[in-house]
Amino acid sequence: MKILSAAQTRELDQATQTEQRLISVELMERAASAFVAWLSSRYSSADAGEILILCGPGNNGGDGLAVARQLLQRGYRVRVALLPATRHSPDWQHNRQHLPKAVPSSEISTKKLPDIAAGALVIDALFGTGLSRPLAGLAATVVTHLNQARARVIAIDIPSGLFADQSQPADSAVVCAQHTVSFGLPKLAFLLPQNAEYMGEWSIEDIGLSQKFVADTTTPWHYTNAAAVAGALPVRPKFSHKGTFGHALLLAGSRGKMGAAVLAAGACLRSGVGLLTAHIPGCGYDIFQTSQPEAMCLTDAKADFISELPKLDGYQAVGIGPGLGQDAASLAVLRQLLKAAAKPTAKTGKPLPLVIDADALNLLGQHRELLKLLPENTVLTPHPKEFERLTEPARDDYHRLDLLRDFAVQHHCLVVLKGACTCLATPEGELHFNNTGNPGMATGGSGDVLTGILLALRAHAQLSPFEAVRLGVYAHGRAGDLAATHSGQAGLVAGDIVRHIGPALKEWE
Ligand SMILES: NC(=O)C1=CN([C@@H]2O[C@H](COP(=O)(O)OP(=O)(O)OC[C@H]3O[C@@H](n4cnc5c(N)ncnc54)[C@H](O)[C@@H]3O)[C@@H](O)[C@H]2O)[C@@H](O)CC1
Ligand SMILES: Nc1ncnc2c1ncn2[C@@H]1O[C@H](COP(=O)(O)OP(=O)(O)O)[C@@H](O)[C@H]1O
Ligand SMILES: [K+]
């Protein structure tokens, strides 16, 4: 699914009207119907009580007026409060004229802010994607008044005051919604942690916008949902054998952090790899062989950390980092690995696929001269702090996305910036946001599990680097979601994610 800019969203409206021979007010009616369908599926008129709809002067306010009429028709009690303006959009005027007399309406002024009881249901239809500057004056006063009221706020399209595709100044007034009901496609702002307090939960309603326009429009931003990865996992052929699905090598673990190696190995095995060999420090031998009997195990000469790079012949992908530690000897191993992996392999003519995580990323951050050794299509999986160590502190989430994109393009690699909406940056400069996963996964070891999944999928001969990583990130979140349905979010541990990788991948079979 694509994510469009605010300007492209306006063009999409226009294109939809032309393509479907609609007048704009008909599209507004569709949006209002979709919103009302959503609201009435959640709240009966008794649950809702009297609903206050705050309407601005543009088409977002027009949506609000159409919603007021439709809710009244469905038996809800509604009143509207209008933000005064010198100019109103034509569709606003149309819906104002068609607002039934039975809906009480008033004009907002500084002296007459609407009464909002705690817990009241309020629909925010002040401003949408047409916001051209931060809110100020009366509009900002209304928003602050609303946010202080502790009401149940539902935003139409986007919380008012929030820009759809760029930051607003830190002190600007933005509605804090409990839920945002948006139309057609998600907006970039919805996916960024800095906007979490405004968005609440959000959902996207289909209003039949032009699919052709979306298909023809280029954007760096994409959203990975179930449809995007449908059919992405190749069927296992009847006569396949363990050699068919690749032999992966995992370099992980150090004294006190063998669990990271065990989790990554378990995840790799559960993700369909043919064979897995782990190279671990001597202290981890019994732990590893006991907990992962399906994997083969090479032990390093050092007991506490990895100091040697095993021969790389015969492996289809190598993962390094989980629980590795940052010893100078492990740094030397990382350097040797980068150099060795860059040489084209006899089988594919391409560099050996690498997945780099955790302490291996921290080592790269401390020795940035190594970045130029990264083989093409290497996968890096930093969380925001690890990413900062590789680049620089970001001013805000939008700046971090710029840094992410630049880094992936400059180093020709795939970077998985982990978080609630994990973002995969490609060497071509695309950004793909993931829609699976839950806060239960904010627990030690979840990232090690992702490394194992990505390692298995990078060893898979039939998946392109991009397909492997997009699918792996999606499946990791899906496994976490399935795990949370059993253990709940608070009780979820990383091992539960490993145990649910199988059921998650089974959904593709
Ligand atoms: N496909 C879609 O997405 C559809 C969108 N519709 C609605 O249309 C909205 C966009 O409508 P508009 O483009 O009219 O935009 P808005 O309703 O967001 O408001 C734009 C108006 O507010 C003024 N304005 C902008 N920033 C301001 C500020 N900081 N302070 C005071 N005034 C400000 C502008 O000059 C303009 O008059 C969407 O968010 C959505 O709610 C629907 O009606 C139809 C379908
Ligand atoms: N709130 C959240 N919602 C969805 N996924 C999350 C959330 N918090 C963490 N995750 C996922 O869990 C993983 C955590 O990785 P990481 O920070 O490296 O943890 P660790 O180093 O402990 O393994 C990432 O894949 C991340 O996307
Ligand atoms: K709004």
Image (cartoon, rainbow, N blue to C red):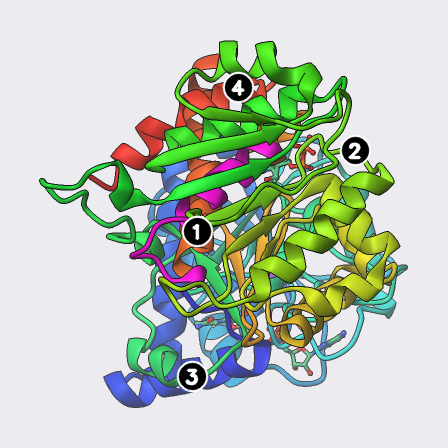
> Cα distance, mark 4 to mark 2?
21 Å
Circle 1/circle 4 CB separation < 8 Å: no
For label 2, count other residues whose C-alpha is less than 10 Å away and answer few (under 14), some (14-19) or many (20+): many
Residue lying farthest bottom?
Answer: 18
Circle 3/circle 4 CB separation < 8 Å: no
In this rendering, would 107 be left or right of 103?
right
What's the amino acid at mark 4?
Gly
Q: Is residue 70 above or below residue 237?
A: below
Q: Nearer the viewer, mark 4 or mark 2?
A: 2
- Read off the residue under disc 3: 217
Secondary structure found at label 1: helix
What's the amino acid at mark 3?
Thr
Circle 1/circle 3 CB separation < 8 Å: no
Of the image marks 2 and 1, the number of the one nearer the N terminus: 2
Q: Position of residue 490 (x, y in %)?
A: 61, 17
Of the image marks 1 and 4, the number of the one nearer the N terminus: 1
Residue 457 magenta: yes
- Read off the residue under disc 1: 458
Q: Nearer the viewer, mark 1 or mark 3?
A: 1
Which segment did they paint magenta? 448-466
Secondary structure found at label 4: helix
In this rendering, would 478 be left or right of 393?
left
